[in-house]
């Protein structure tokens, strides 16, 4: 098992209940989502992204965020992260008992407009009161950067743009900055390039990677990042995932696959893959809504 002193150990962040289900071809009942998260909580995962407090008209599959957060059994030692796009989302999250929130912006202007209906600069303005409230309440905050490597509208992203935005999010008060390959397009060279630009401004221990796996490159990219000292990696049980506003966004790297990969490399992660497999099997077997 991993220990905090073990600098080779990784922290696996499970995003299936949010990223996996926000865009899934069918809906799941609130009870099935709660059971999914409760089973994942028993697997040793240290962080589970449970839901998102966004406009339910924009993402109907996350409309039951309050009920999900209030229904799950919170296990000591597990962080239950939720997405909040604005003050309204933060207020709903706090009312549901959330203590860890994620704001999300993008390194691509066209994607920012499509996803959150504002420019990158406006998104940072929206985050300012969120960081102020979070600090006052002692909430833990992750700052996501979507399209940190490439974008379906803009093509390759300048690594310096991602690095500057990452530094800004850290400066504003993010406990962790997560670089996302939203459409799974990054090559190992691009991953290395973005990290080379970012690491002088954001230390490895404050960075996480969120790699969708469209072209089967996520594992190789994670290996590149691991060698650069990154230890926090997002995954999704069953490889579910995608963004409704990003054409071509396939699922995140499957949790089970990354666990097997780390096992092969002898890298401690502390997650029981059989429990994760049970969680996803139960979810997929649940009645459609
Ligand atoms: P907007 O339209 O600019 O906001 O949306 P607004 O303030 O003008 O409000 C419009 C309506 O939305 C109002 O309701 C508000 O009350 C409501 P109406 O008067 O029409 O009835 N509203 C809300 N309701 C509940 N909770 C809220 C909220 N905010 C406004 N928080 C907004 C801006 C960002 C809210 C909207 O565009 C939105 O919700 N977008 C959804 C974005 C999203 O969820 N994207 C997917 C997640 S991000 C992702 O997948 C990427 C990631 O995985 C990393 C990666 O892979 O890249 C994280
Ligand atoms: Mg994603």
Image (cartoon, rainbow, N blue to C red):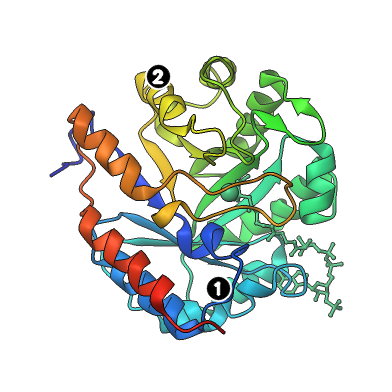
Pointers 1 and 2 in contact (C-beta within 8 Å): no
- Picture layout, residue 227 above or below residue 60: above
**Which one is nearer the viewer's eye here, 185 or 177?**
185
Label annotation for residue 150? none
Whether residue 163 is visible here, answered yes or no, is: yes
Q: Where's residue 219, x and y in %?
A: 41, 31
Element under disc 2: loop
- Residue at figure coordinates x 44%, y 45% from the top left: 234
- Picture layout, residue 12 above or below residue 61: above
| Residue that mark 2 sits on | 228
Element under disc 1: helix
Label annotation for residue 94? 1
Q: Nearer the viewer, mark 1 or mark 2?
A: 2
**What quarter of the picture does the C terminus occupy?**
bottom right
User: Residues under labels 1 and 2: Cα distance?
Assistant: 35 Å
Name the side, left or right, on which 136 lies relative to 271.
Answer: right
> Which residue extends farthest left?
1
Q: Where's residue 16, x and y in %?
A: 47, 59
Q: Where's residue 13, x and y in %?
A: 40, 50
Which image quarter: residue 48? bottom left
Name the side, left or right, on which 110 lies relative to 151.
Answer: right
- Picture layout, residue 217 above or below residue 28: above
Whether residue 11 is visible here, answered yes or no, is: no
* Mark 1 surroundings: few (<14), some (14-19) or many (≥20) residues within 10 A: some
Quarter holding ligand 1: bottom right
- Residue at figure coordinates x 51%, y 83% from the top left: 29
Q: Is mark 1 within 8 Å of ligand 1?
A: no
């Amino acid at each position: 098992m991993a220990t905090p002193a073990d600098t080779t150990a990784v922290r696996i962040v499970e995003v299936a209940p949010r990223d996996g289900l926000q865009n899934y071809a069918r809906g799941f009942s609130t009870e099935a989502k709660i059971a999914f998260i409760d089973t994942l909580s028993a697997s040793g995962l240290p962080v589970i992204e449970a839901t998102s407090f966004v406009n339910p008209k924009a993402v109907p599959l996350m409309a039951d965020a309050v009920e999900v957060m209030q229904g799950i059994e919170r296990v000591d030692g597990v962080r239950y992260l939720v997405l909040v796009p604005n003050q309204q989302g933060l207020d709903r999250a706090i009312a549901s008992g959330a203590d860890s929130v994620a704001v999300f912006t993008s390194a691509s202007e066209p994607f920012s407009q499509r996803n959150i209906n504002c420019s990158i600069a406006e998104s940072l303005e929206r985050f300012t009161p969120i960081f102020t409230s979070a600090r006052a309440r002692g909430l833990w905050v992750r700052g996501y950067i979507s399209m940190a490597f490439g974008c379906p509208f803009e093509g390759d992203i300048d690594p310096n743009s991602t690095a500057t935005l990452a530094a800004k999010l850290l400066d504003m008060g993010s406990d962790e900055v997560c670089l996302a390959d939203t459409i799974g397009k990054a090559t190992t060279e691009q991953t290395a390039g973005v990290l080379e630009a970012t690491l002088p401004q954001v230390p490895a221990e404050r960075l996480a990677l969120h790699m969708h796996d469209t072209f089967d490159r996520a594992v190789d990219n994670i290996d590149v990042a691991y060698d650069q000292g990154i230890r926090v990696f997002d995954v999704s049980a069953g490889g579910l995932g995608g963004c409704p506003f990003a054409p071509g966004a396939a699922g995140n790297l499957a949790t089970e696959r990354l666990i097997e990969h780390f096992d092969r490399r002898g890298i401690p992660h502390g997650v029981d893959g059989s429990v994760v497999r049970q969680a996803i099997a139960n979810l997929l077997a649940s009645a459609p809504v």
